Amino acid sequence: MTAVIERKSAESDREAEKGRVALKGFFRITDEWGCTTEERSRLLGGPSRTTLYNYAKLKPVKLSRDTMERISYILGIYKALQLLYPTHERANRRIRLKTSDIPFCGKSAMEFMTQGSMMNLMLTRQYFDAKRGW
């Protein structure tokens, strides 16, 4: 019985550490992109300001599958932008440039992604992956 409890505790600790690492990447990227608190909240699916503030402390926390998936999309978008553009500045600036390309239709990628839907993050990821030929 003790071994089962210890194993569950170890699994829980691993999940919490995964959450901390994911949030660390998320906050680093959104800092580079110059995101506001509101944009960060929308990218993560709308957690409260208090939750977002607690996340920013980067303590181990088990994140929901939805939040982990959203962060995964953001990491992929960031990577694609870094591969597409020769400098971090240009890559980070691209996220805020308006474009008539589908799916953005006159909005910037950031405006499109912060509409709140997971689908918007997925479409943005697909767009930038396609742009880099992947």
Image: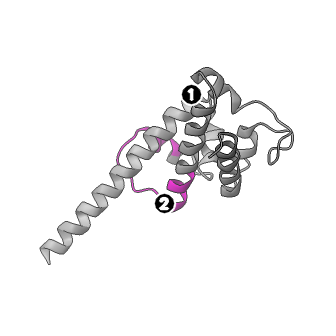
Which residue is at a point 76% across and 30% down the rendered structure image?
A: 97
Start-end of magenta stretch = 52-70
Residue 76 picture location, percent across and down: 56, 45
In magenta segment, residue 87: no
Residue assigned mark 2: 64
Could you say whether the residue bearing mark 2 is in a helix, strand or loop? Answer: loop
Residue 49 in sight here:
no
Residue assigned mark 1: 32
> Which of labels 1 and 2 is toward the front?
1
In magenta segment, residue 59: yes
Three-letter code, disc 1:
Glu
Residue 55 picture location, percent across and down: 46, 44
Given the current orientation, which residue lies at the most extreme left position?
2
Quadrant assignment for the N terminus:
bottom left
**Residue 65 numbered mark, or none:** none
Instruction: Specify the quadrant of the image occupied by residue 131.
Output: top right
